[in-house]
Amino acid sequence: MKRHILFTAGLALALLGRIHAQIYIATGGGNTIGVYNFDGSVINASLITGLNNPYGVAVSGTDLYVANYNAGIGKYTTSGATVNAAFITGLNAPTGVEVSGTDLYVANFNGHTIGKYTTAGATLGAPFITDGVYYPYNAVVSGSTLYVLDNDNTTNGRVGVYDATTGATINTSLISGLGGPSGIAVSGGYIYVSRFNEGLVGKYDAVTGATVNATFISGLNHPFGIAVSGSDLYVSNFYDNKIGLYNAITGAAINASLITGVSALGIAVVAIPEPSTYAMLAGLAGLIVAIGRRRSAGFGFAPARTIGHQGKDSSK
């Protein structure tokens, strides 16, 4: 019986142990997109090459979108194949790209706008948002809300909030007074902002904009890209050429040098498998454990048959 419990528990852990993340990194100087495992090991440091100063990267399913500062938005597969290198053109220094369902949002840095498109490339709004947008670095969606990170390279950087469907303004300065903000992530009711000029990451309430901790992570060397997956927070320490991993709840460093040798501008983290698959596996694992417990308690189930040494049935 004990062996059976260990077997079922082990199987459950094996199922859940497959849950991890892949990290996609846009390296502006290298003009590449690289992909790495959750533990920092390299999958392919040159998954996509020949780009033109990529700042932002976003992933949805098997589709990967790149914001090329000098060349618009390109569309690729997560295996690195080119779908359309000139997927969206006519932009003015795009620095951020965000995908939500079938909607694609683009931060048009020198165009002073946020554009909205479909994942098929159709224009929904160009511009989609202009109110309160000066130099938008990135935009992220959480639910029906679009958060826009605006950077003017002084201490007047801010986060504005808009309706993701209509583009209607909710608050152009939910968070203000940021010094050179360069990256934004929203998760679990919190906004995380990397502050390039100040060498830190701040944490804020996603509804009120109230400061939770303005120096949530400090001592960084010009942080840029930032991404959250569950309780993990990934930060590009740009001038140190590395990606650090931190606890999104406490800010504690898990591995400040998770990935080294990369000057990352944009980061996208994708759970493998995706959340729906994870939920299915977690439910299956729980069912296996429950059955194992019922069997061990003798609730009308036959005892587990285990094979001992030399292939002998030890249950007899």
Image: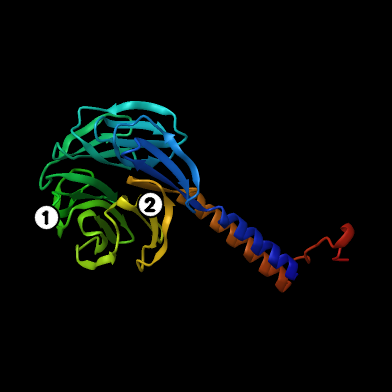
Tell me the quadrant of the picture where the N terminus can be found: bottom right
Disc 1: which residue? 156
User: Which residue is located at x 24 percent, y 46 percent?
Assistant: 139
Tell me the quadrant of the picture where the C terminus can be found: bottom right
- Find numbered disc 1 in the image and state the secondary structure of the residue it sits on: loop
**Viewer can see residue 138:** yes
Which callout, 1 or 2, points at the residue further toward the start of the chain? Answer: 1
Q: Could you tell me if the residues under marks 1 and 2 are in contact, i.e. CB atoms within 8 Å?
A: no
Q: Is residue 95 above or below residue 206?
A: above
- Find numbered disc 2 in the image and state the secondary structure of the residue it sits on: strand
Where on the picture, by quarter, is residue 306?
bottom right
Residue 272 falls left or right of residue 220: right
Disc 2: CA contacts within 10 A as few (<14), some (14-19) or many (>=20): many
Residue 16 falls left or right of residue 190: right
Please tell me which residue lies in front, 100 or 213. Answer: 213
| Circle 2: residue type | Lys
| Circle 1: residue type | Asn
Where on the picture, by quarter, is residue 198?
bottom left
Disc 1: CA contacts within 10 A as few (<14), some (14-19) or many (>=20): some
Where on the picture, by quarter, is residue 174?
bottom left
Residue 113 falls left or right of residue 145: left
Nearer to us: label 1 or label 2: 2
Please tell me which residue lies in front, 294 or 67. Answer: 67
Disc 2: which residue? 242
Q: Is residue 163 above or below residue 105?
A: below
Residue 219 percent across, percent down from the top left: 29, 63
**Gap between marks 1 and 2, in whole Å?**
27 Å
User: Which residue is located at x 67 percent, y 69 percent?
Assistant: 293
